[in-house]
Image: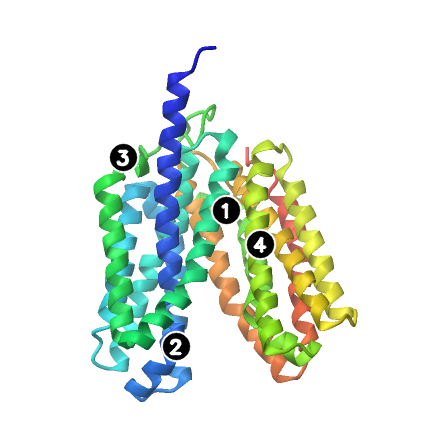
Amino acid sequence: MSVDVHDGSRVSGELSTIGAVGVAHFTSHMLQLALAPLFLFMRDDLQTSFVELGLILSIYFLCSGVGQVLAGVLVDRFGADRLLFGGMLLQGGATLAMGFAPRYEALLPLAALAGLGNSVYHPADLSILTHKVAAARLGRAFATHVICGNIGFALSQITSGGLGLAFGWRAALIIMGAGALVVALGLLLTLRPALHVERHAPAGPGRAHAPAPSFREVLAMPVVIIAFVYFMLTSVALAGVQGFSVVTLQEGFGASVMLAALSVTLYQLGNAAGVAIGGHVADRAAHHHRIAMGGLGAAAVLGFAMALLHVPPEATAALLAAMGFCVGLTMPSRDVLVRRATPDGATGKVFGVVYSGYDIGGLVGPLVYGRLLDHHEPRLVYVVAATALALCMVTAFGVRKRPS
């Protein structure tokens, strides 16, 4: 039996690309959550309040969300690999500089710079994967991208908090920022070809080359607006489930602190398992909107069940794990849907716009859930989250076709 050497070389190249993009996404998520575990140390040292420290994160994510739209335009104009390396260097350098900030006020512009650096990852990463990975393996490539980011989230707070306890908050930020710079330089020196995409190259085999649409034309596409709403609603839902479940389960379900924390961990594990399986499903499916709608609908049902049924606290852990699995199952198909709805030459613009919805949802969601908890309505947290997931089903149907 003969071996197709060309195909083997192509697969090897794709693995290098997927690995390099995964490392970059992991680095981004490691730095995103590096500040929060250090707030106690920073408050005492800088003589600030938690509200003032929270403003640092608000500025960070605001700049990240707004910057994603601009980054998408720049990715298509100057190349995804250039923007990716520039963003990694900017985010790592700004994080390192925070460790040298002489006073609180100096942290605010540095947070803005770090947020702008973080803004490049989704439009650059997903553009690279779209152009460099064959359609038959793209679902698994997107799944790997998500999982690497989730691993970064999981390790970030442990690493940052541990370094803060051992060496202080300044050293923690310096070490993590320097580490990101080392990773960026390592990728630049060793894997630059695996990340390089020819500008205006058709996004995938069989796609005819056509003039790239302008940013204004991209914004005028209904499918892009629908996808933006899809990502925003998903982010609103996950902000409640991931960010507020520990408090919600204690106040509304009688769970202990340990059980509540375990429930959120099980959600994350379920989500990772769903993403891994969802990547294989996406590569074998023809109707990705059905996968997205099915997973979102199942997750919404589980959310409503948690809110409306009086189940033992222990059962909520199982429900959250199942909910995480259902949401994770949809994520690779979601990214494939957006990729198929993207005109040639506009991959960065489209992913930049739709992924900015994630940051907008991340800003709006906590305000809603915080107000519900202030009014002692913890179960409504899951009602709102489930409603957002149910509405996502409609948007998933709307993204099912590529614009003509």
Which one is earlier in the sequence, the residue at label 4 or at label 3?
Answer: 3
Please state which amino acid type lies under the numbered disc 2: Leu
Q: CA distance from mark 2 to mark 4?
A: 29 Å
Which one is earlier in the sequence, the residue at label 2 or at label 3?
Answer: 2
- Badge 1 marks a residue whose secondary structure is loop
**Structural crowding at the residue carrying mark 3, measured as other residues with C-alpha within 10 Å and reported as few (<14), some (14–19) or many (≥20):** some
Q: Which residue is mark 3?
A: 193
Q: CA distance from mark 2 to mark 1?
A: 33 Å
**Structural crowding at the residue carrying mark 1, measured as other residues with C-alpha within 10 Å and reported as few (<14), some (14–19) or many (≥20):** few
User: Which residue is painted at 31% across and 69% down in the image?
Assistant: 111
Please state which amino acid type lies under the numbered disc 4: Asn
Please state which amino acid type lies under the numbered disc 1: Ala
- Determine whether, in the image, residue 178 is placed left or right of residue 10: left
Q: Which residue is mark 2?
A: 55
Which one is earlier in the sequence, the residue at label 2 or at label 1?
Answer: 2
User: Which residue is painted at 70% across and 76% down in the image?
Assistant: 253
State the image coordinates of residue 270 (x, y, percent, origin top left).
60, 55
Q: Quadrant of residue 213?
A: top left
- Badge 2 marks a residue whose secondary structure is helix
Viewer-nearest of labels 2 and 3? 3
Q: CA distance from mark 4 to mark 3?
A: 32 Å
Considering depth in this image, is 209 or 370 the residue closer to the camera? Answer: 370
Q: CA distance from mark 1 to mark 4?
A: 33 Å
User: Which residue is painted at 79% across and 69% down in the image?
Assistant: 309
Please state which amino acid type lies under the numbered disc 3: Pro
